[in-house]
Amino acid sequence: MTQSFECPREDAAPSVFSPARLLLREPPVGDRLLGRFGPFEARLAATRKEVRKAQKLRYRVFFEEGGAQPDAASRLARRDLCAFDRVCEHLLVYDMEALNRFGRRKPRLAGAYRLLPQETARRHFGFYSQREFDLSPLLARRPQTRFLELGRACVDARYRSKRVVEVLWRGLWAYVQREGVDALIGCASLPGLDADALALQLSFLSRCAGAGEEWTARPHAGRRIEMDRLPQGAPLDARRALAALPPLLKAYLRVGAKFGDGATADPQFGAIDVFTVMPTAEVAARYAAYFGAPMERPDGALA
């Protein structure tokens, strides 16, 4: 039987949520500020209002621009509604020098990432990627590893530059170091549902960046899409494959990401998903080299 892996509704199972996680009051700035880089500030959402801003940005990027199909509630609210939002951390990048229509300075949300620590996942729904991939063997093999799931990455169309992506990732790295995260996981998407049309990209990820048995995860039964789709013996044009990958997947590869065994289809978002894992001990040096520009920490020092 084909399982449905849509995001739970925002009003689903309210009893599982801890009131402390509902962002009822704003904590001190120092607790949520991750760093500053020029006019941009990376911080964790502290209020429901900030989470709603992230949901509105995601709606514009995924549904209005990207062609994904919202459910009725999301369409009515014009926000990407998901119950996971109530238990996740939300990494936000603001342009602190943006101006409103009256010419006054008003911070504008430029990008967002959703972060799900393993401890939170265990208490609530599990990881979002478990709706597509069987993570049980991976978690059993590495019981001491602290995983952090990444998801819902998006950048406002006005800010789709390397700089904003760098700030998102540098804020993420600050969070990883602060929380002692051992590995980053999540689903990365290739646009389109025709796996044969993505044969070059999927084959490249399988042959050149496979996770290996220690870190891999596989799709649930009945959802598997083979990744190595090129004819047997056919050469792989790695340069052309890399150029054809979406920007986020390229960024993951630059810092040493590995990819699971088998892909899945996500009809709602019109994409083929691959499981992604980045052990922090292995990617730290490459991460620092790629996102090496100093960023001011909350204590005023440079990181």
Image (tube, rainbow, N blue to C red):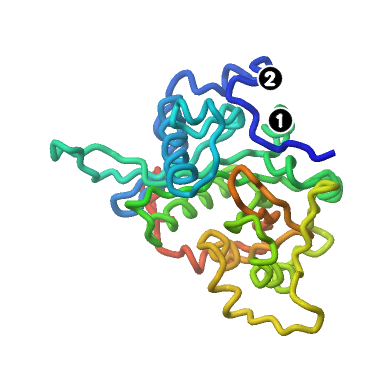
On the image, numbered disc 2 is attached to which residue?
16
* The label number, if any, that marks residue 125 in the structure image: 1
* Rendered residue at 50%/23% (across/down): 23
Report the amino acid beneath label 1: Phe
Which element type, helix, strand or loop, lies under badge 1?
A: loop
In the picture, the quarter occupied by the C terminus is: bottom left
How many discs mark residues in the rendered view?
2
Q: Is residue 250 above or below residue 111?
A: below
Q: Is residue 296 left or right of residue 106?
A: right
Q: Position of residue 19 (x, y in %)?
A: 58, 16
Which element type, helix, strand or loop, lies under badge 2?
A: helix
Q: Is residue 183 visible?
A: yes
* Rendered residue at 44%/41% (across/down): 92
Of the residues under marks 2 and 1, which one precedes in the sequence? 2
Front-most of residues 227 and 133: 227
Front-most of residues 283 and 110: 110
Measured in 3D between alpha carbons, the distance from the residue under mark 2 to the one under mark 1, in whole angstroms, is: 9 Å
Q: Is residue 285 above or below residue 5?
A: below
Q: Are marks 2 and 1 in contact (CB under 8 Å)?
A: yes
| Residue 32 image-quadrant placement | top left
Q: Residue furthest left?
A: 102
Q: Position of residue 105 (x, y in %)?
A: 20, 39
* Rendered residue at 49%/67% (across/down): 290
Report the amino acid beneath label 2: Val
Q: Position of residue 125 (x, y in %)?
A: 71, 30
